[in-house]
Image (cartoon, grey):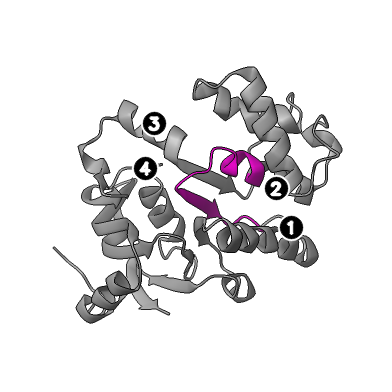
Amino acid sequence: MENEGKPELEMETALEKNGDIIIEGIEIVRTFKMGDVQVRALRGVNVKIRRGEFVAIMGPSGSGKTTLLNQLGLLDTPNSGKVVIDNTDTSLMSDKEKGKFRLHNLGYVFQDYALLPELDASENVYISLMMQGKTKEECESAASEILKAVGLGDRLHQLPSKMSGGQQQRVSIARALAHSPRVLFADEPCANLDSQTSREVLDLFKKFNTEKDQTIVMVTHEEWHAAYADRVIRLKDGVVEERT
């Protein structure tokens, strides 16, 4: 297997000693076909993330940041290699099993918010809880609690179109955290926000990471965003270039 990364044994051994590993990506290869050309977005990537860790994934455009996030978050399937989440080998799952696992165990925040425009803030948050089989009363209570936690307790029944970009992203964060996911994945969550609103969103991430021991994996291209993280994984040309 091709792997152009730096020697990892000593570093990974130290990582294991410092905490419980919740995500492990093992020799992940992801290739895309563009016309007649095969593009190797990830070339044998190995990563480990501790429970309760806030990790930023960085690198230049085309380095494989979002592709790696999609593999770790089970939003895409590698051509080879595997992802183990909380001792569960997800490569052994069917697509249906992966969908169920995502629904109950993982949370996602995207740069475009991905809210349903016809639903208010509370409904956008609790729709995924209803898919898990919870009662409407349980869903409404959980949505209210998490929206208050992200500073939107007074906007429970407001439509996304009546909210600022920062408020919509807070609803997106509340939706992702409502079911207490094992891991929260965030792909450029501040890309459409100004610096002050970005700081408020990142402060929220840090709050949940610190106070709730929430594991967070975030893709960003901004160095000052990455300063909120405990550790940075830098990619270049589909391989891990550096871990700090």
Total marks shown come to: 4
Query: Which residue was labeled with disc 1?
Result: 193
Give the percent coordinates (x, y) of residue 137.
Answer: 66, 20
Determine the residue positioned at 50% across, 51% down.
185
Lower sequence index among marks 2 and 1: 2
Front residue of this view, candidates 218 and 36: 218
How dense is the environment of label 4, judged by Cα within 10 Å: few (below 14), some, or many (20 and up)? few
Q: Are marks 4 and 1 in contact (CB under 8 Å)?
A: no
Q: Secondary structure at mark 3?
A: helix
Lower sequence index among marks 2 and 3: 3
Q: Is residue 113 visible?
A: no
Residue 160 part of the magenta segment: no
Lower sequence index among marks 3 and 1: 3
Q: Secondary structure at mark 2?
A: helix
Front residue of this view, candidates 39 and 10: 10
Residue 129's mark? Answer: none
Residue 184 part of the magenta segment: yes
Give the percent coordinates (x, y) of residue 43.
Answer: 26, 62
How dense is the environment of label 2, judged by Cα within 10 Å: few (below 14), some, or many (20 and up)? many
Give the percent coordinates (x, y) of residue 26.
Answer: 23, 58
Q: Which residues are magenta?
A: 173-190
Determine the residue positioned at 56% across, 55% down.
212
Q: From mark 2 to mark 4, how far is it between C-alphas?
A: 23 Å
Q: From mark 2 to mark 1, how far is it between C-alphas?
A: 9 Å
* Disc 2 residue type (three-letter): Gln
Lower sequence index among marks 3 and 4: 4
Label 3 vs label 4, nearer the camera: 3
